[in-house]
Image (cartoon, grey):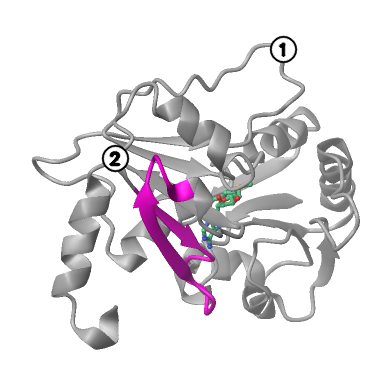
């Protein structure tokens, strides 16, 4: 028995790794959630498919339930693939699943994926670092667990670029917090549904981005690299923009 903990990338089925494809091809069962592009599942032709993501109007399964499903499948099947959007360890709760499996003595193979946090900006031509402009970036959740007693996200990051995941719901409150430390005119780029056919880019500043219509899933990128992106876009051939 082996469980492959696999990152499926941000959506474009071509952005999945060869290692992920090899694991899927030998899978007896695939446990997947919403962000994984369904086309990728075709590599696992014939495998049992277990969906554990959120479905319309229903709550998603609790993490403990998912861990239990993984343990049960691992004890029953030769090859289990746990497929997760982006990279399993970037806000994917992959660490929790890994620990739960290891504690049961189950062998786990780890397959990284292209995280949306970096992969999505790259595909549109937005570099998260840029010589002379940004020497650091931070990736942060815009939706910290509301049950946490003490907030871990303080928004006082001194990184040149801030990439916010799960940042649509609390965009107004979060940009207000960031403006305590950064100029309200700091440029912001939002990328909705990155690498997918319905990808959409919204530009603004810290001061006005929350007034714009934005739908999840989206990335919020804050910092002067957004101006570099605008420059890159202007110089891109029409058919590439
Ligand atoms: C629970 S996190 C999972 C992140 C994932 N593990 C990764 O590495 O990309 C989900 C968040 O990732 C971001 N995200 C994932 N896929 C995206 C995409 N294709 N375009 C824009 N944002 C995306 C959004 O901020 C979304 O709310």
- Where, by quadrant of the figure, is residue 139 drawn? top left
Comparing 186 with 161, the one in front is 186
Along the horizontal axis of the image, is 56 left or right of 159? Answer: right
Q: Quadrant of the C terminus?
A: bottom left
Indicate which label's residue lies in the foreground, 1 or 2: 2
Q: Which residue is mark 1?
A: 149
Crowd around label 2: few <14 · some 14–19 · many ≥20 (10 Å) = some
Contact check, label 1 and label 2, Cβ < 8 Å: no
Give the residue displayed 33% in from the left and 35% down from the top: 184
Q: Residue at x 28, y 58 (%)?
A: 126
SS state under label 2: loop
Horizontal side of residue 16 vs 58, given as left or right: left
Residue 169 appearing in the image: yes
SS at mark 1 in the image: loop
Residue 100, above or below 40? above
Find the magenta span and give its range: 188-209
**Name of the residue lying farthest toward the left:** 132
Residue 174 on image: x %, y %: 52, 33
Q: Kindly identify which residue carries mark 2.
A: 186
Q: Residue at x 83, y 45 (%)?
A: 66
Residue 225 in the image: x percent, y percent? 23, 48
178 or 140, nearer to the observer: 178
Query: Does 48 sit above or below residue 119?
Result: below
Image height of 181 relative to 217, above or below? above
């Amino acid at each position: 028995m082996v469980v492959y903990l696999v990152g499926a990338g941000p959506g474009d089925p071509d952005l999945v790794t060869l290692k992920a494809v090899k694991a899927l091809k030998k899978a007896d069962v695939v446990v997947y959630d919403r962000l994984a592009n369904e086309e990728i599942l075709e590599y696992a032709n014939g495998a049992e498919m277990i969906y554990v993501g959120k479905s319309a109007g229903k709550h998603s399964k609790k993490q403990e339930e998912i861990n239990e499903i993984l343990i049960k499948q691992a004890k029953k099947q030769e090859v289990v693939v746990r497929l997760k959007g982006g990279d399993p360890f970037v806000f994917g709760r992959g660490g929790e699943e890994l620990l739960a499996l290891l504690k049961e003595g189950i062998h786990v193979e780890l397959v990284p994926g292209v995280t949306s946090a970096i992969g999505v900006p790259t595909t549109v031509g937005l570099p998260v670092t840029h010589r002379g402009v940004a020497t650091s970036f931070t990736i942060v959740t815009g939706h910290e667990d509301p049950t946490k007693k003490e907030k871990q996200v303080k928004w006082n990051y001194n990184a040149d670029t801030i990439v916010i995941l799960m940042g649509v719901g609390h965009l107004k409150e979060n940009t207000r917090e960031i403006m305590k430390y950064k100029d309200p005119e700091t440029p912001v780029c939002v990328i909705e549904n990155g690498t997918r056919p319905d990808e959409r880019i919204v530009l603004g500043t810290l001061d006005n981005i929350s007034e714009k219509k934005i739908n999840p899933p989206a990335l919020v990128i804050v910092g002067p690299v957004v101006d570099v992106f605008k420059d890159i876009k202007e110089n891109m051939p029409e058919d590439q923009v």
